Amino acid sequence: MPEKLLNAELIKQIKLLFETQLIYPVEIIDFSDKDESESYAETSQLLEELCALSDKLSFQHYEIHDQPQLAQKFNVSFTPGLVIASRERDELLDYGIRFAGIPSGYEFGSLVHAIELVSRRDSGLKPETRLNLQGIHTPILLQVFVTPT
């Protein structure tokens, strides 16, 4: 078995955060490409280690070429591609949060924060910001690109 990606101190910190901050179940859906075996293995291991830290987290993995309709439904075209969603009984609540690529380095913190926000079902935006956003009537695709450092 490969060496753990998360060290003991980080596991302790994340576990405490999840125990105190996660409210509703979160489902992480991973789309990979079997032809990119290295990125698949690392992403899968990272998500498995992370989901093992809370019973409120679950992890589903799909091969993008085997499930093209599902990937299209979630608007995932890059692999690894992650969907961070909430679960209510049998219903998946999709907030549009996606990660393309391995969420390592600084992006790992963004992944943990996204999990927390989805579990709370609240963006944390101020009331005046929410009011301003109500004035937007057309769909907007917001993408943030980062490079590993």
Image: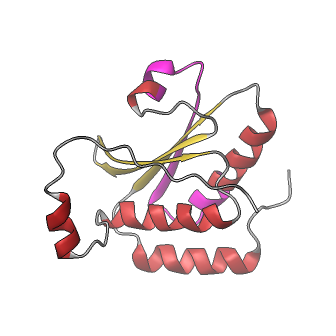
Q: Determine whether 134 is above or below 113 in the image.
A: above
Q: Is residue 62 magenta?
A: yes
Q: Which quarter of the figure has residue 74?
A: top left
Q: Which quarter of the figure has residue 13?
A: bottom right
Q: Residue at x 21, y 41 (%)?
A: 138
Q: Residue at x 20, y 59 (%)?
A: 133
Which residue is more in the foreground, 127 or 138? 138
Q: In the image, which residues are magenta?
A: 48-71
Q: In the rendered image, which quarter contains the C terminus?
A: bottom right
Q: Count of labels shown?
A: 0
Looking at the picture, the colour scheme in use is: secondary structure
Farthest residue, direction right: 2
Q: Determine whether 14 is above or below 114 in the image.
A: below
Q: Is residue 68 magenta?
A: yes
**From the viewer's perspective, is 95 left or right of 138?**
right
Q: Position of residue 20 (x, y in %)?
A: 43, 80
Q: Position of residue 120 (x, y in %)?
A: 32, 67
Q: Residue at x 47, y 76 (%)?
A: 19
Q: Residue at x 14, y 57 (%)?
A: 134
Q: Position of residue 99 (x, y in %)?
A: 54, 48
Which residue is more in the foreground, 100 or 29? 100
Q: Position of residue 117 (x, y in %)?
A: 38, 65
